[in-house]
Every structure is written in C-alpha cells, then in structure tokens.
Image (spheres, helix red, strand yellow):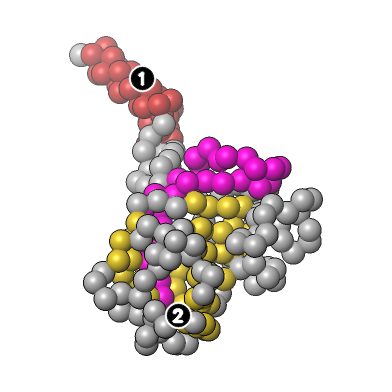
Amino acid sequence: MRYLFVLLFLAVSSPASAGPITWKASNEVSNVNDGMNIWPGLEPGTPWELSVTFDPQSSPTVLSPGCNVYGTGAATFKLGGFTYTRSSGEIYTNAGLPDVGCFGGLPEGEAGLIQFFFGNGWNEEPGAWSLNDPFGVLIAGYYDLNIKDGTLPTVPVFDPNGGMFGGLMFRSPENQFDGGAVRFELVEQPTPVPEPATMTLMGAGLAALVAAKRRRR
C-alpha cells in the first residue's frame, strides 16, 4: 500500500505543459524619423509595450539550417496612449530583418537572434499614429543567451552581448522609429495538465485502492 501512494504522488506531481505562452516587453522610443509627418507628437521618450502569444512547440518553416519561421497568435502593441492589435505575426530565428536574410553558418554574435515580425494589418484606434504603411514593418528582436539552434525558448534569457539586429524598430520607405532594447519576459503560460501516461497511472492506482479495500472487507 505504501508503494501505491508513492505512485499516486508521482502521477499527480508530474504534469506536462503544452500550448501557447505570452511574452511581454516594454521600453521607450529612442529615435524618430517622420519624413511624411504622419506621427505628430511621436518623439523620443514615448513609451511602448508589446505582448505576443505563440506556441514554442509549433512546427516551423525551415528556410535554411537554424533559420526558421514560426507563426504567432494574437499580439498587442501599445505606443504612447494608443493600442494596436492583430491576430497573427511571424517569428524569425537567426535571420537579420528587414534588410538581411538567413545567416549562412551563423557568424559569431548573430546566433540566437529571435525576431518578431509584423507587417501592416494592425487594428488601430481612431486618431492613432498609423502603423499600416503598405511597406511598413514592426520588428522586435533580441538575442537569446541559451537558444542558438533556431528553436524557440519558453522562457527568454536576454543576451546583453548580442549583435546589431536586436531591438525594436518600425521601418517604412519614408518613416521610421526605434525603441531601444527588447527584453521579453514570460507573463503567461498554460496550466499544466497530466500526460496520458500519467492519467493511466492514476487510474490504475485508484483501481488498486478499490481492490485492496474490497479485500479487507
């Protein structure tokens, strides 16, 4: 009976996590180049915040070894007093965006680069600074200290010695702004659920308890 309780304890205390997680980062705008004057009032020091949901276990599109593209779920971007939302985006690993593609051979300093990429298609509030330039992209990238092989980490670990492609940036032919370093944090993860094998073990343990009780009677 003692061993049965041990088995039940192991079954209950060995959950598995699976499903989407949410990361969040925030900082301030560091530079603005508004050649078309479409962002009146946007200036250095304006706060921003990005939260994005994705499944780190999802299957990527492989562009080259170590250079992958993953899909995201919903994303929310706050810039000053405006909020922007969208249903999806992309995550590139070991690729320098927007001007450089996959790094052949992953030169030193670039391995571990993870960039969240969003084109136009934002849902914008009335009067918001527009991010929906036809050729505009918003990129939030950082270098992960531990993950270098093109997979996605569950918990981000910011590498302060990363290369030149990290940071937040909006780029279009006429307008751009930069938002400084991107330090993502895990803010939401799925509730652990028992694996199928764990459920089977729990069921077997409960059945054995019932059988033992009947024998004592």
The residue closer to the viewer here, 78 or 155, is 78
The residue labelled by disc 2 is 36
Cα–Cα span, label 1 and label 2: 69 Å
Q: Nearer the viewer, residue 57 or 7?
A: 57
Quadrant placement of the C terminus: top left
Please report the residue visible at 74 percent of the width from the left and 64 percent of the height from the top: 109
- Name the residue located 36 percent from the left edge and 27 percent from the top edge: 199
Residue 184 position, x and y percent, is 49, 65
Which residue range is magenta in the image? Answer: 48-77
Q: Nearer the viewer, residue 42 or 55?
A: 42
Amino acid at the residue labelled 2: Met
* In this rendering, position of residue 77 left or right of residue 162: left
**For residue 180, side relative to residue 96 (left or right):** left
Residue at 49% from the left image edge and 76% from the top image edge: 175
Picture disc at residue 204: 1
Q: Nearer the viewer, mark 1 or mark 2?
A: 2
Q: Secondary structure at mark 1?
A: helix
Magenta stretch contains residue 176: no
Mark toward the start of the polypeptide (1 vs 2): 2
